[in-house]
Every structure is written in structure tokens, then in C-alpha cells.
């Protein structure tokens, strides 16, 4: 049973529909990415799920139970990391954590203990007593995420958590997210960075204009839009015989050569690569390098919406 | 309840570190009360906390009525130590005494004053006041008006009596003049007892005036939370929206009560202010704080952002303070003084004045109920606009 089930939720402001019949689900231990440009409806969708905004229609179930804005029990299952740095700059890191821990119903002792644990997880134990206003952007981001982990959520929702973050902190955030899914947490992750969705998410929903345009694993999405993988082979001579060998393979869709380089299009490069290498070895071709280029989510998004992710 | 308490404690910690709030809630009220006491209370002489003034009388008339004024009206007040009266020969001397600061005001009784009054003609008793002693000048004007009013009553009585009597009108007037009571010390003292003394008035007025600013900064924390994104986190947490609003307003109320308590104690110790019976002061202070927070929250509910809320609330705090007599006596507002009944400041200060009159806590019941009513109206408006206030 999915931990989060979203069915046909919609939200309008006046005549503008900002979320339009959005449906998806996330299983325990799964990371679901909502991929779309700014203004696509990602944050509004998340705001509805966490209970900040009232939906106009549709239903949300968390852990099998109907969820609403006033439902404290289901809210307690959600860890929320807003896009904005939602921390108190005039309080210390540990005070921020203890405050939110208490807000989620942890006892004083549990809040203290859990705050220490989270500080360890986000790597801020040595800066616990410092006021957040003295933190770098990356440290504040890590604290922002840490607050979302305090209540040991079954569903962790992160809204563009890496905006303006240095590479080191970004990697730390990715590691934290993976650790959570490893512990069975369902993760909803919004981003407009294609690389993040590819690296982190088991499944992706491509959202634009408030609508989910397509959904699935990266491979499924690429297949659905009909984009091919590319294998680029570089070799020392024997190009023509190699081309003939590759053309004979049943999975080959197209082969072309230029200089010492051969480019071939196939439906699934990972599946066909061993066969390609075997065939070329049998013909005595000496390969200098092999590169597989899979169509990325950027291409999928472009195909689905007619525009680039950063438009 | 635990979540509300958690937010409340967090807010109080933040407010205690807020320099602007401390400035508006404590430093400015005390500073302004000290300045007003020094400038307005001190110049008219506030020995032992009471009012005294120095007047010059220029009697160019020397008639019966003029003598009745100087001896019958000013004399008893001087005997009671409220006034010091000196005389000057000419109007110029009288003006000189005021300009040199020797007198707070001068009464000029023109030549022919008594005869003109006896003939039923109108005459002027001129009061020349010092700009540096507005309170003493106001008192001088009121003494002049009271005397004029008393004289008119005698004239009317004589006219009515003469119409149905064989007695000669002049004789009646003489009798009336002999028996008419001057503006007695007892009557004035009775009126004075319903007024706060200068020190307490300015201490209470400034404290309540700045209470609105303290409430403003506390209520504005809702907009601050929205601005820094933490409001979204509060709304996503397992706590109801009314709970979030209750926590925010509770912190404003506690800050207000703490501010008032400190100001009451500090003004009593530092300036000698006499606020009255502690229980009555506590009832008025708590209901006053509730009114201030309720009105502030109600207005903030209609603001779109922090800047707009602060602008609106600053203007309203000023208007209510001025109209409510928090900074200067309501009598100086003239016809506008009726509006003061729509301000919590008026009711708060009236409550304190009632308390000082007879010391009974029961006398503050009406002001307290009015203040609680204002709190309910403001709080209701805030609750009605909660959705707008708490959207992240």
C-alpha cells in the first residue's frame, strides 16, 4: 500500500487553476520527484499535501487514512522542508530543533535527545549553540532539512532543498535523503534540476501548468516519449568493418561513422552494450573508448512541454 | 495546548531579545513620562505632587466686584497654598511679570469693571498666560470663567426675583452679592480628587500610549514568521490555526502585561506616581492590555504585509493616544473630546481617576467592561480575518 496517495487534487485562485487534477502515489522507501520549472505548481501541490493550503477538490491519503488541513494525526507523519529557509535566525541551531521537536509533540527529554541525533545527521553538532544568523547558506539549508527529520516522518517532503547550496552541502543533502529512503521513508522531492531528479528519484512526475504531464521511472519516461540511447565508440582503424558488424545487430536502429568514431542509436544501450562489445571483439576491432548517452529528463520535458526546464 | 505553550514560550524568548520592543515597551514610556513631568508638571510647581501656581493681579478697577474676585476667589485659594498671588499696578507690569517668568499668568481687571457689571454691561477679565506653564494658565482661565459664571447666576437671580418683589433690584443684588458663595476651595478640591495628579497622569498616559506599540511589535511577529518562512512550518505542524493565532496573541498579551507592570512599579518608585489600589490597577491594566492587543490584531488582520501592518498600526496608535488623552488632557480637545469615549485610553485613564477618587475597586468596573468589550471586538475581527493573516 502506498504511504501517500494523491488523487485528482485541484486548486484555483480566481479563474487561474494552479493545480489541475494532480494524482500520484509514493510507496515506503521510494523517492518520487516532481520535476518542473518555476511556476509549474510544485510548491502549491506540496502546500496542499502538508496542510498549509486547502484543496478545492480531490483526496489525499497518508498511510491509508484520509488527510485534511485540520488533521493533526496525519500531519504528525509528515516531515516538511520548505523551499524557503524556514528557521529562526535569532535562535541557535539546537533551539530551533528543540522548538520544532516540541511542536511535533515530543517530550522535553525526547526533544533534547532527538535534536542531538539530528544535529549529528546534518553535521552541525559542533555548531549547535551558535545562532543561525551566523551560519553559511549551506549550513542553514542543512538545518532546514534537519527540522524536517525531527519527528521521524513516514513521509518526507522536500521542496527544492538545494536552491543556492554549495556542492558539498548538496551532496550532504543527497546522502541524507538516500539515508531516509533506506530507512523506509517515502520521499517527495520537488526540483527543477534535472540532474537531481535523475540522481535521487525512483520515479518522476513531470509537472507543468499545474498538470502532471507524464510519470514513471526515467527509463519509462524516455521510452514513452520515444527517445533513443546513443553509443559512441572510438577505435584505432577498422571503422568500416565495425560499422557493418554493428548494422547487422537486430537492436541497431542507426549507425554512422566519422573519423575514428562510430555513433549508433539503440532503444536500450545498457541492454545491448555487451552484445556490441562482443561483436566488435570478434572482428578484431581495437576500441579506445565507449560512451553511452541516454536521453535525459531534460529531453523528456522538452518533448512533453515544448520548453526547457529552466524557461 | 502543549503546542500553543511551546510557541508562546518561543515567542517570549524572542521578544525578550528584541531591542526595538524593549525600547517602545519600557524605555520610551518611562523617558517620555519623565520629560512630561519635568516640563509640564514641574513648571507649575508640583511640590509634594500637588498643583501650585503663581499669578499676578492687575486691579485697575478697585471696585466691589474686582475686590470680590481678588479677595473672595483668589484669596481662599492662596490661603490653601494652591496659589501665590502678587499684585501689579499696570497692565504692562502684569505682562512683564509673566514674560520674566515671575508669574505663570496675570489677571487684568480693567478700569470700570465693577460699574459696568452693575449696569448690566459686558466686560472682559483678561488672562495673560505664560507659554511655559500651560497647566497653570488653563487653571487661571477656568478660575476666570468660574467667576464670570457665578456673577451671571447672581444677575439672573436678581432679575427673576425683582420681577415679583417689592424689594428694590439694587438692594437684591447687594444681598445676593453678600450671600453668594465664592468659588469655594471645597468645590475645587472635590473636582481635583477625580483627576489624576500630574505625575500619575503622565506616567499612566505614556504607559498606555506605548502599550499599543508593544502590542504592535508582538502581533507583527505573525507577519515576520510569514516573511521568514517559519509560518509555513507552523501551519504544517500538528497544531490548529486558531491555536497558532492564540499563541501569537497570548505572547502579545503577556508582553503587554509585563510592560505595564514594570512601568507601574518603575513610575511609582522613580517619579512617585500614585496609581491607586493595586487590585483595581491590575484589573484596568489587564483589560487595557487585552483591548490594545485585540484592536491591534483586528487591524493587522486587514493588512497585507508587515510593512503595511506597522504603518497602519502606528497611525492608529497615535490617533487613539491623542484622542484618548494619553499625552495631554482631553479638555484641550474641545469638541473632539466626545471621540475619546471610542478610545481605550480614555476608559483606562478614567478608571484610574475613579480609583484615585475613592479607592474602591468597584469604580473601575465600567471601564474594565468597556475595555474587555473593545478586546472582544478586536479579537473577533482578528479571528474573522485569521485565514488571511495565517496564509503562508
Image (cartoon, coloured by chain):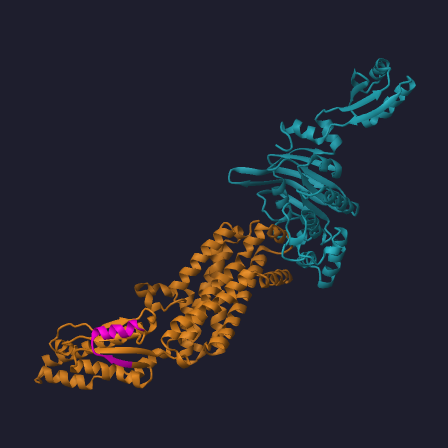
Chain colours: A cyan, B orange
> In what quadrant of the picture does the N terminus of chain B appear?
bottom right
Residue B193 placement (x, y as % from top left): 37, 79
Residue at horizontal 67%, vertical 57%? A92
Q: Is residue A79 above or below residue B22?
A: above
Q: Nearer the viewer, residue B132 or B28?
A: B132
Whether residue A206 appears in this view of the structure is yes
Is residue B270 shown in magenta? no
> Residue B382 vs residue B91: left or right?
right
Residue B198 placement (x, y as % from top left): 40, 74
Q: Is residue B331 above or below residue A118?
A: below
> Residue A150 vs residue B62: left or right?
right
Q: Nearer the viewer, residue B260 or B93?
A: B93
Magenta region: B85-100
Quadrant in the picture for residue B36: bottom left
Q: How many numbered marks have been drawn onto this rendered protein structure?
A: 0
Q: Is residue A32 above or below residue B125?
A: above
Residue A16 placement (x, y as % from top left): 53, 37
Residue A200 placement (x, y as % from top left): 75, 39
Q: Nearer the viewer, residue B80 or B233?
A: B80
Whether residue B145 appears in this view of the structure is no
Is residue B99 shown in magenta? yes
> Residue A165 vs residue B259: left or right?
right
Residue at horizontal 60%, vertical 42%? A44
Amino acid at each position: 500500500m502506498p504511504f501517500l496517495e494523491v488523487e485528482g487534487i485541484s486548486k484555483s485562485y480566481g479563474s487561474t487553476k494552479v493545480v489541475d487534477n494532480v494524482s500520484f502515489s509514493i510507496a515506503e522507501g521510494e523517492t518520487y520527484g516532481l520535476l518542473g520549472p518555476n511556476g509549474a505548481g510544485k510548491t502549491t501541490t506540496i502546500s496542499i499535501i502538508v496542510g498549509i493550503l486547502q484543496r478545492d477538490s480531490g483526496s489525499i491519503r497518508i498511510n491509508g487514512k484520509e488527510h485534511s488541513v485540520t488533521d493533526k494525526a496525519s500531519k504528525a507523519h509528515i516531515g516538511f522542508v520548505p523551499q524557503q529557509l524556514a528557521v529562526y535566525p535569532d535562535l541557535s541551531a539546537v533551539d530551533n530543533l528543540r522548538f520544532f521537536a516540541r511542536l511535533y509533540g515530543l517530550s522535553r527529554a525526547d526533544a533534547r535527545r532527538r535534536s542531538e541525533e539530528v544535529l549529528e545527521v546534518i553535521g552541525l553538532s559542533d555548531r549547535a549553540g551558535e545562532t543561525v544568523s551566523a551560519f553559511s547558506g549551506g549550513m542553514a539549508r542543512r538545518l532546514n532539512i534537519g527540522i524536517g527529520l525531527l519527528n521521524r516522518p513516514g513521509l518526507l517532503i522536500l521542496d527544492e532543498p538545494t536552491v543556492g547550496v554549495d556542492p558539498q552541502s548538496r551532496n550532504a543533502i543527497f546522502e541524507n535523503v538516500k539515508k531516509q529512503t533506506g530507512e523506509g521513508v517515502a520521499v517527495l522531492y520537488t526540483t527543477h534540476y534535472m540532474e537531481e531528479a535523475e540522481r535521487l528519484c525512483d520515479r518522476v512526475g513531470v509537472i507543468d501548468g499545474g498538470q502532471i504531464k507524464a510519470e514513471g521511472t526515467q527509463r519509462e519516461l524516455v521510452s514513452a516519449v520515444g527517445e533513443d540511447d546513443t553509443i559512441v565508440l572510438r577505435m584505432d582503424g577498422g571503422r568500416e568493418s565495425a560499422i557493418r558488424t554493428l548494422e547487422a545487430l537486430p537492436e541497431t536502429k542507426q549507425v554512422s561513422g566519422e573519423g575514428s568514431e562510430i555513433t549508433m542509436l539503440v532503444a536500450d544501450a545498457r541492454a545491448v552494450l555487451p552484445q556490441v562489445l562482443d561483436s566488435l571483439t570478434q572482428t578484431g576491432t581495437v576500441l579506445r573508448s565507449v560512451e553511452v548517452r541516454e536521453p535525459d529528463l531534460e529531453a523528456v520535458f522538452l518533448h512533453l512541454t515544448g520548453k526547457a526546464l529552466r524557461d | 495546548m502543549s503546542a500553543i505553550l511551546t510557541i508562546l514560550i518561543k515567542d517570549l524568548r524572542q521578544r525578550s531579545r528584541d531591542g526595538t520592543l524593549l525600547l517602545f515597551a519600557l524605555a520610551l514610556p518611562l523617558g517620555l513620562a519623565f520629560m512630561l513631568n519635568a516640563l509640564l508638571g514641574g513648571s507649575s510647581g508640583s511640590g509634594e505632587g500637588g498643583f501650585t501656581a503663581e499669578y499676578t493681579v492687575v486691579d485697575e478697577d478697585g471696585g466691589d466686584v474686582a475686590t470680590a474676585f481678588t479677595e473672595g476667589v483668589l484669596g481662599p485659594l492662596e490661603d490653601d497654598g494652591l496659589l501665590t498671588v502678587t499684585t501689579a499696578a499696570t497692565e504692562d507690569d502684569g505682562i512683564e511679570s509673566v514674560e520674566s517668568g515671575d508669574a505663570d499668568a496675570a489677571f487684568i481687571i480693567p478700569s470700570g469693571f465693577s460699574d459696568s457689571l452693575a449696569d448690566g454691561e459686558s466686560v472682559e477679565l483678561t488672562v495673560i498666560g505664560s507659554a511655559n506653564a500651560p497647566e497653570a494658565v488653563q487653571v487661571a482661565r477656568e478660575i476666570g470663567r468660574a467667576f464670570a459664571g457665578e456673577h451671571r447666576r447672581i444677575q439672573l437671580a436678581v432679575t427673576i426675583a425683582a420681577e415679583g418683589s417689592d424689594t428694590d433690584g439694587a438692594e437684591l443684588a447687594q444681598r445676593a452679592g453678600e450671600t453668594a458663595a465664592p468659588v469655594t476651595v471645597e468645590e475645587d478640591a472635590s473636582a481635583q480628587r477625580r483627576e489624576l495628579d500630574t505625575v500619575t497622569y503622565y506616567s499612566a498616559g505614556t504607559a498606555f500610549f506605548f502599550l499599543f506599540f508593544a502590542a504592535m511589535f508582538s502581533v507583527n511577529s505573525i507577519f515576520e514568521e510569514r516573511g521568514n518562512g517559519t509560518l509555513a512550518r507552523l501551519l504544517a505542524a500538528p497544531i490548529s490555526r486558531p491555536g497558532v493565532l492564540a499563541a501569537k496573541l497570548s505572547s502579545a498579551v503577556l508582553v503587554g502585561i509585563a510592560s505595564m507592570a514594570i512601568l507601574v512599579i518603575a513610575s511609582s518608585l522613580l517619579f512617585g506616581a500614585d496609581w491607586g489600589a493595586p487590585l483595581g490597577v491590575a484589573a484596568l491594566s489587564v483589560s487595557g492590555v487585552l483591548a490594545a492587543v485585540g484592536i491591534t490584531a483586528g487591524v493587522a488582520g486587514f493588512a497585507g504585509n508587515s510593512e503595511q501592518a506597522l504603518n497602519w498600526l502606528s497611525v492608529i496608535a497615535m490617533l487613539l493616544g491623542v484622542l484618548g488623552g494619553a499625552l495631554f488632557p482631553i479638555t484641550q480637545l474641545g469638541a473632539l473630546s466626545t471621540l475619546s469615549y471610542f478610545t481605550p485610553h480614555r476608559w483606562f485613564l478614567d478608571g484610574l481617576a475613579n480609583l484615585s477618587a475613592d479607592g474602591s475597586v468597584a469604580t473601575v468596573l465600567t471601564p474594565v467592561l468597556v475595555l474587555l468589550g473593545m478586546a472582544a471586538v478586536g479579537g473577533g475581527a482578528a479571528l474573522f480575518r485569521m485565514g488571511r493573516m495565517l496564509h503562508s
